[in-house]
Image: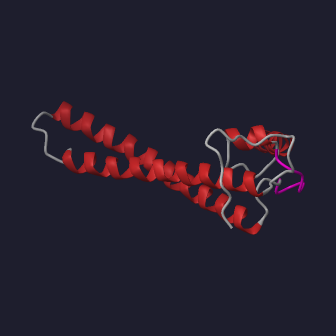
Amino acid sequence: MTVELESEYRPTEDEPFMNDRQREYFKNKLLAWKDDILRESKETLVILQEESQNHPDFADRASSETDRSIELRARDRQRKLISKIDSALERISDGSYGYCEETGEPIALRRLEARPIATLSIEAQEAHERREKVYRDD
């Protein structure tokens, strides 16, 4: 089922949580984000192929290799991000999107707006980070 959204629509607390409009809104937001990442990745591949030329100067070659390494690390992070986006899209399909994986409570719309791949409410995320910090300090 597809829901028509006016271009200026933003989810609000005044409507039922994760209604059809909100799910469609976040689905569109996630798909647009994924498309942007994939487009940027294709552009990066073209640039990396063009720059694969040998540089006669060692400093130029070192600089080029450093840039290439940084770009590849960024692309790897984005590959992982695409996986999280796909997971969020699956949660939209199965109806679990927008609900905290730990508490089952709704995740605040403002949090989802800022981080549409969020799986934890702010409170659960903060608790998770506190536990992580305690274990890291040992």
Give the x, y percent position of residue 44.
Answer: 33, 47
Q: Is residue 64 above or below residue 80?
A: above
- Indicate yes or no whether the magenta region holds residue 82: no
The residue at 39%/40% (across/down) is 70
Q: Is residue 126 visible?
A: yes
Quarter containing the N terminus:
bottom right
The residue at 44%/49% (across/down) is 75
Q: Nearer the viewer, residue 34 or 49?
A: 34
Q: Nearer the viewer, residue 12 or 37?
A: 12
Q: Nearer the viewer, residue 17 or 136?
A: 17
Q: Is residue 138 visible?
A: no
Residues drawn in magenta: 100-107
Coloring applied to the structure: secondary structure
Quarter containing the C terminus:
top right
Looking at the image, the residue that sits furthest to the left is 56
Looking at the image, the residue that sits furthest to the top is 59
The residue at 28%/41% (across/down) is 65
Give the x, y percent position of residue 123.
Answer: 86, 41
Q: Is residue 44 left or right of residue 124?
A: left
Labels in figure, total: 0
Q: Nearer the viewer, residue 4 or 61?
A: 4
Give the x, y percent position of residue 98.
Answer: 78, 53
Give the x, y percent position of residue 104.
Answer: 89, 57
Magenta stretch prevailing secondary structure: loop
